[in-house]
Image (tube, helix red, strand yellow):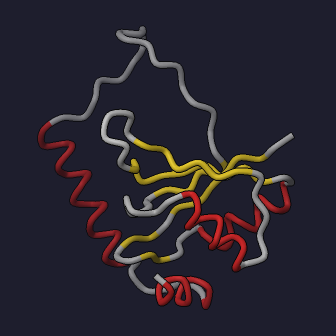
Amino acid sequence: MSFTIFLGNLPTWVTADDIKQWLTAEDLVADSVKVIRNHETQESKGFAFIEAPTADEMQAIIRRFDRAPLEDRILRANPAQPSKPKTKGAPGAQPAQTGDAQRAGAGRRDKKRKKDASPRSAFAAELAKAL
């Protein structure tokens, strides 16, 4: 059984090799790393999935990377959730946010990002220096 970690809010330049190097530098083990890319442009979508061999290793990776600063971003790491089926017009489906509601949500995210800009650990500070 493998344990999948979602690693989000990555800059678009981050590759699977970068993540593997970060894991190795921290003595963490991953079975695989997959950076998710746009099918048309091949540009990173800003998130990746890491397969850990054990639940303990999964938790160690999450502790190291969750809320770690990288450039002007705060990384997010948590157990991956199963993907939801894509169905058009499904009963009970929520409409997408548009217009003012979408812009209001973006403003809240920007304020939170600025507030959380300070490093949370020695690892986070070293990671920021290395990159």
What residue is rendered at 38% in x and 81% in y? Answer: 117
In the rendered image, residue 76, in percent from the top left (x then y), is placed at 52, 62
- In this rendering, the answer to whether 97 lies above or below 128 is above
In the rendered image, residue 124, in percent from the top left (x then y), is placed at 55, 83
Horizontally, is 37 left or right of 99 in the view? right
Work out whether residue 89 or residue 69 is closer to the camera in this orientation and state it: 69
Give the number of marks.
0
Question: Which residue of the protein is positioned furthest toward the left in this rendering?
Answer: 99
What residue is rendered at 43% in x and 13% in y? Answer: 87
What residue is rendered at 34% in x and 76% in y? Answer: 72
In the rendered image, residue 41, in percent from the top left (x then y), is placed at 31, 41
Position of the N terminus by quadrant: top right
Q: Quadrant of residue 97?
A: top left
In the rendered image, residue 115, in percent from the top left (x then y), is placed at 35, 78
- In this rendering, the answer to whether 78 lies above or below 67 is above
What residue is rendered at 35% in x and 48% in y? Answer: 43
Horizontally, is 108 left or right of 85 in the view? left
- In this rendering, the answer to whether 42 lies above or below 28 is above
